[in-house]
Amino acid sequence: MEKQKFGVAVIGCGTVGTAVASALVRDEGYLFEKTGVPLTLTSIVDIDFSRARAAGLPEALFEKDFQKVLDDKSIKLIVELVGGTGFAKDVIKKTLAAGKHAVTANKALLAHHGGELYPLARKNGVALAFEASCGGGIPIIRALYDGLIANRIDALFGILNGTCNYILTEMTQKGRSYQDVLAQAQRDGLAEADPTLDVSGMDTAHKLAILGSLAYGRRVDLEKIPVEGIDTLDSADVAFGRELGYTVKLLGVAVRMENGISLRVRPTFIAQDHPLAWVSGPFNAVSVYGSVVGHTMYYGRGAGGSATSSAVVADIVSCALGTADAVFRNLKIWPDVSEAAVQLPIQDIVSRYYLRLMVEDKPGVFAALAAILGKYSISISSVLQKEPQDESASIVPVVITTHRAKEGDVAKALEEIDRLETTRGTGVCINILDEHEETI
Amino acid sequence: MEKQKFGVAVIGCGTVGTAVASALVRDEGYLFEKTGVPLTLTSIVDIDFSRARAAGLPEALFEKDFQKVLDDKSIKLIVELVGGTGFAKDVIKKTLAAGKHAVTANKALLAHHGGELYPLARKNGVALAFEASCGGGIPIIRALYDGLIANRIDALFGILNGTCNYILTEMTQKGRSYQDVLAQAQRDGLAEADPTLDVSGMDTAHKLAILGSLAYGRRVDLEKIPVEGIDTLDSADVAFGRELGYTVKLLGVAVRMENGISLRVRPTFIAQDHPLAWVSGPFNAVSVYGSVVGHTMYYGRGAGGSATSSAVVADIVSCALGTADAVFRNLKIWPDVSEAAVQLPIQDIVSRYYLRLMVEDKPGVFAALAAILGKYSISISSVLQKEPQDESASIVPVVITTHRAKEGDVAKALEEIDRLETTRGTGVCINILDEHEETI
């Protein structure tokens, strides 16, 4: 190992930071033998080293002064694992300005402030790599910028949040309620004490913004992505969907349409025989439909220190080999060198829909629903109405699935249906996503 | 497009060659815009241009003289899509010797003669890229040399042959016989007129040799891989397995054991809830278990001109960007710069087994079977013995699944069982592959 060391510093010593540091220390010899690159961890920067200490990392690596790391010429790359969009942003900006490569897992930061960071990397002749930002250890960013580069991407469907997928899997397989599963997931450490970012769909939106940008080579505006979480999902709908042959997943969806890209995040029904349907528990997966390759799918652990560190270390190796730089410099798919995406408004989404309406159990009610749907050119595909379990029940659910329709029309029809005297509450509306047709 | 063109020639104008040539012509502008690399197809070499003509490729590209292409300095890369191990080998050797990058989809050639080709590429300072050799359009080679580089690979299970997977899917889902499905697949163009390479498992073995070498960074010897095809598979076993909760797949398996790597190709039962179990029809998929990332899986079309051309073009772009060269030059996982793998002999495979024995329907027979299994320390996990449908039937199947046992012991026990007076024919023995335990 006489070759000049490629010094790496890790900033932020939480779950992922500790896992990355541990991997670099534990596998230094193995990685050198395998890659020919003499990676070496020189510093771990944080103010609290309790996790690092618990993991048995050497005290000599602990450093509280970020500036010292910036000034150290032997450090060629800094890994930002601070999280959030405040100090983390500062870390990356200073790293790039110092002419060092930056590697991050920070989807929120990239989705909100990528616009500032990519050009800074470019200006300073270094790479900004972020495989770990989407899908944890799944090499999905690489698939988009490398393995699938020959393709125009027709569609991308992603299960991108392990907490949500765990909750939905439990709701689906065991018929449990959202609140019940969430509470247990929090007790088991599978959901944060404040789970808002996950269950609201925002975390998935951050990842979809990043993946959508690379897939289409067009800069996606996070603010324009319609986002719905799983926090209002009723287990009754999960059960009805199941009966109809569907599994509900929180999906980030990006579909190329004639006039732009339709992006959205929401609980979505997919057919039980779609490859994404069996992705259960904390696993993530992304289906990508390419114009040349057809349907490909990528599956793995979407979170957790170890799995995420696999992606971070892959980025470190790519930076050291110069391949990260070669793709960052040459390809025109990065958000700072591509045009803004034409993002279609929510009412232009074309999809099939699942509707659940609570109606009075009396003659003529269904005819009224059907008439309103017909008025908006929404064609009914199936109807599920059960005998009331309790004979005295006067309000019963009617479940309707539609053929493909425009979301704007469905919204208008639902509004009108909600105003009927024979309906109660607000109708439930859930996207049904059919297998995307391959164009090869 | 003033930049100096990066000339590409395609040798071999069959299904894949025509698809690659068509992609390069059709997408020249798109690929330049996306990658910044001015790829240009300069020649298609073959003696028969009927397919190329039918695809509407320009006559000006047709060239019968390979030497002219070799001599053309503007051609930086040659794609070998001739197939076979004769002329194809010559094409690649001459390409590399001429200082041009070589891209190939030829698994047989690499598995048999990679030993000659890799060093030649290295000596001439060019890359030999072969993403299309395994899994068609699935970027699985890249996953091993790039996305998963931080990992020691614990295990790799691959469905690597679309023809076999199509046949097995039909047998499983519709209870059809092997011969029946094969005949139809041949009529439908899903199987070759001579399907031997596919159904014998040899094609899968070629791919496993390539993937195993990269996964473990150890040179795998094709000749030492035990190979069984699907051509002797009885639909009765497919049905019994299904009843027990298993789906049969032709798997290429590579597992890292304490004392070496266990590699094999054979029809294998996997649990119906394993991600590979639902991979149906002509699709391929590879599960990779990494020491850091845990279980990841890669899914897509394993054959076909278009899907395969996606991988070929990705390699062309990587060669043009210099990234293919950077990984080929630096990483120590390529077969010419890595040690020979320690390949464990077949009798050392440790697995669970499915056994079907045809026995006389009379008292004491099962006790005799159980005694022999016990003698070889093979522990029974489950037994399935049905009432004979025809009361006069004197020979009935007994299906036994075992706990983990050494294959050598199972073979000895089966030999002994086959010699019993109360058994008929040769017992059927099929591996049961449990979900590999993640080590993260």
Image (cartoon, coloured by chain):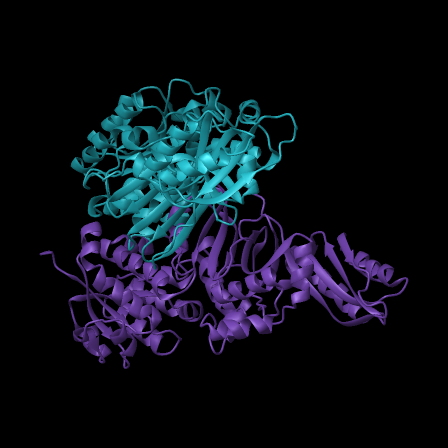
Chain colours: A cyan, B purple
Q: Residue furthest right?
A: B363
Residue A27 as seen in the image, left or right of residue B103: right
Camera-side residue: B58 or A349? A349
Residue ID at (39%, 65%)? B304
The image shows residue B438, relative to residue A72, as above or below, that is: below
Q: Decide if residue A320 is in sight here.
A: no
Q: Decide if residue A97 is in sight here.
A: yes
Residue ID at (27%, 71%)? B55
Camera-side residue: B56 or A15? B56
Residue B313 as seen in the image, left or right of residue B61: right
The image shows residue A320, relative to residue B90, as above or below, that is: above
- Expressed as whole percent of the image width and height from the top left, the position of residue B391 reads 85, 67
Residue ID at (44%, 72%)? B189
Camera-side residue: B231 or A61? B231
- Expressed as whole percent of the image width and height from the top left, the position of residue B317 reads 26, 56
Can you say which quadrant of the picture contains the N terminus of chain B? bottom left
Question: Which picture quadrant has residue B412?
Answer: bottom right
- Expressed as whole percent of the image width and height from the top left, the position of residue A57 reads 46, 28
Q: How many marks?
A: 0
- Expressed as whole percent of the image width and height from the top left, the position of residue A13 reads 41, 25
